[in-house]
Image: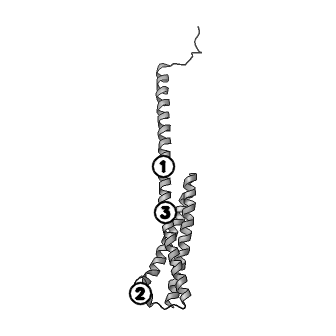
Amino acid sequence: METELLAQGVERKYECLEQLRDLGRRQMALVDQGEMATLLDVLAAKQRLLVRLQQIEKALDPFRDQDARQRQWVSESQRLACAEKLNGCQELLREIVAQEKQSEQRLIRRRDEAAIQLQGVHAARQACGAYGDKLDHNNAGQIDLLSDT
């Protein structure tokens, strides 16, 4: 029955969104910990799930143009369960979007902190280089231990 396909598609969508939400939580923890190598693995896994979600959405496309009142459900409880799962999908999607925004803000903060640290290292190297050049040119601080006098 067509509504059974719809219910299965909604269930797959919900499961995929749950996995995306869980990976989003892991992503934020990795950003906070500065674990960029592991973060890349999580982002790759999220990309695979996004591709899967697109496939699920494409499979659900034929149902979008249908009049929901015209669908023939096996039972009212099946229709209500599918509607509830679809509402759950919307909630998960909102949570995922909020996670992504929060994760982006955290990554920007980490990037800015790293830039400040790099500027400090660069300034320290410049200072060391400037002192090193002066010492080399003036031979200051050197003792000649080879002279005969």
- The quarter of the rendered structure image containing the C terminus is top right
Q: Is residue 128 visible?
A: yes
Name which of mark 2 and mark 1 comes first in the sequence.
2
Residue 98, numbered circle: 3
* Residue at 46%, 81% in the rendered image: 60
Q: Residue furthest left?
A: 65
Residues tagged 2 and 3 counted as in contact (Cβ below 8 A): no
- Callout 3 environment at 10 Å: few (<14), some (14 to 19), or many (20+)? few
Residue 67's label in the rendered image is: 2
Secondary structure beneath label 2: loop
* Label 1 sits on residue: 111
Taking the image as shown, residue 62 lies to the left or right of residue 95, namely left
What kind of residue is marked 3? Ala
Label 1: element kind: helix
Amino acid bearing label 1: Arg
**Residue type, mark 2 in image:** Asp
Q: First in sequence: mark 2 or mark 3? A: 2
**For the residue labelled by badge 3, is the local secondary structure a helix, a strand or a loop?**
helix
**Label 1 vs 3, first from the N-terminus:** 3
Give coordinates of residue 8: x percent, y percent: 54, 82
